[in-house]
Image (spheres, grey):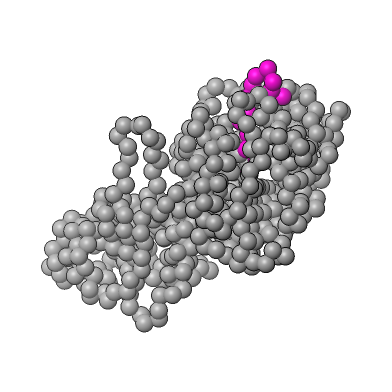
Amino acid sequence: MKKLINISLSEIKLNDLTKLKSETLIIGSYETKKINDITNIFDKKSKGVLKKLISREELSGSLGNILYLPNLEGTASEKVYFVGCGKKDKEINEQEFLSFSQKVSDAALQSKAKNVHIFIPSISVKNRSEEWNYKILARTLESNCYKYFFKGKKNQPKNNLTKVTLLKENEKKGLGAINKAMKVGHITGVGMNTSRDLANTPANICTPSYLASSAKKLSKSFPVIKTKVLGEKEMKKIGMDCLLSVGNGSAQESKFIIMEYYGAAKTKKPNIIVGKGITFDTGGISIKPSPAMDEMKYDMTGSASVMGTMRAIAEIKPKSNIIAVIAAAENMPSSTATKPGDVVKTLSGQTVEVLNTDAEGRLVLCDALTYVERFNPASVIDIATLTGACVVALGHEATGLLSNDQKLADNILNSGYASCDRAWQLPLWDCYQDALNSKYADIANIGGRAGTITAACFLSRFTKKYNWAHLDIAGTAYGGKVGKKSSGRPVPLLTEYLLSQK
């Protein structure tokens, strides 16, 4: 995925805003019932137009309010949008600023211009810097320009916007730190779009082999990432029978993908992200009901988010070591499919009684979580659309988080707030483990009413040798406000966390 827009930063004097020749100029304005420093400049040039609009409360400045003024007199730009920044001295929170950034992006896209200039005055976000504001704004501009293009479809969606210039009042402070933050935000937006492209691709195209090919293409574009792919023969040889059991009923070969990035000495412990890559989930023999089964192409969104995050890491190039693994399979019913009641052996040597073949994500993840022990990780995070129970518990707003290490959990929670991609911690108490008892194997693959928690309890049996966290993205990967399409989450959270690990 290439950048959809070019984003740059430039300084400007306030009085020069009306002289700026642009297809579209977007101006942030504070909430007030009187003319202020910014609106006064445009009011004088337009001979009192803005004062009238303020008096009629059409230009309110309330947070996110948009006013479109075509051919504003005295202004060199063709189209002018005013976007409300709220009260000048009032602090807002991260989610409010994200919503504001989305409104700015909406105005840029609605203008249907190729070239847009944006001037946003200082907005105070609690516990966040000016650099943070520009990072989130740049990320939002890139990610909001995303549209999925499927070759062969008539009336393809169009994205006219190709260039955005963010304007900052000339303060003679230099733009180095802001430029750096913008770059990280912009690249994170590209990572989100990379994830969305994979997740939105139909399952007849996006197979385990397609994921493997996409990982190799990413390595070709960014040689700092080294990619290795294991096929079924290689997995069978090392004992990944549990992962292989999920793909038994499919004609598509299961794949195990390892992507390695070394930005520090190889002696430094890596942070590892593990993605569930079920490219389509029928439920297997425990087949799902047909309504909304088309959405099961999104059951590989964990792997898509891992790929999008590695796309961002490859360009940002942090001075740390990061490894990503993807366990990819297609879960189909057939005469060769795993059956309820079957017992399979895991890479760890533990045996699993498969009581429900629709609880397959944990079966591919457990072998992946055992595999990564060989890297002696500093931390391991797995990402999966694992349980519908998580959607019931948290809706589409927060990602479910469970961990065997509270410091790691706190770091992830903080990264969620810092990236506006929030998670919420659920308990991983020993009292839930008994629900997974099996008469015929070491562990059953389902158990109990607390589905999200017992799924994490299952995974915890394979993570005792390192600090581990599980992210259940069933509610945040797609659906909710974004509809039946990928959200690009949790790429921002993962990128924020990985960049914070020095």
Out of 485 and 418, give the one closest to the viewer: 485
Q: Is residue 436 left or right of residue 275?
A: right
Which residue is painted at 36% across and 61% down in the image?
Answer: 7
Residue at the spot 66% in from the left edge and 41% down from the top edge: 230
Q: How many marks?
A: 0
Residue placed furthest toward the right: 439
- Is residue 357 visible in the rendered image? The answer is yes
On the image, the x and y values in percent for residue 221 come to: 49, 53
Front-most of residues 79 and 394: 79
Give the quarter of the image for residue 182: bottom left
- Residue 494 x %, y %: 58, 55
Q: Which residues are magenta?
A: 326-338
Q: Judge from the rendering whether residue 29 lies leftward or rightward of residue 40; answer left or right.
A: right
Left-right relation of 121 to 77: right
**Residue drawn at the location 71% of the way across and 27% of the way down:** 356
User: Which residue is found at the position 43% from the left and 70% from the top?
Assistant: 179
Is residue 346 in the magenta section? no
Of 5 and 323, nearer the camera is: 323
- Residue 406 spot, x, y in % from top left: 73, 58
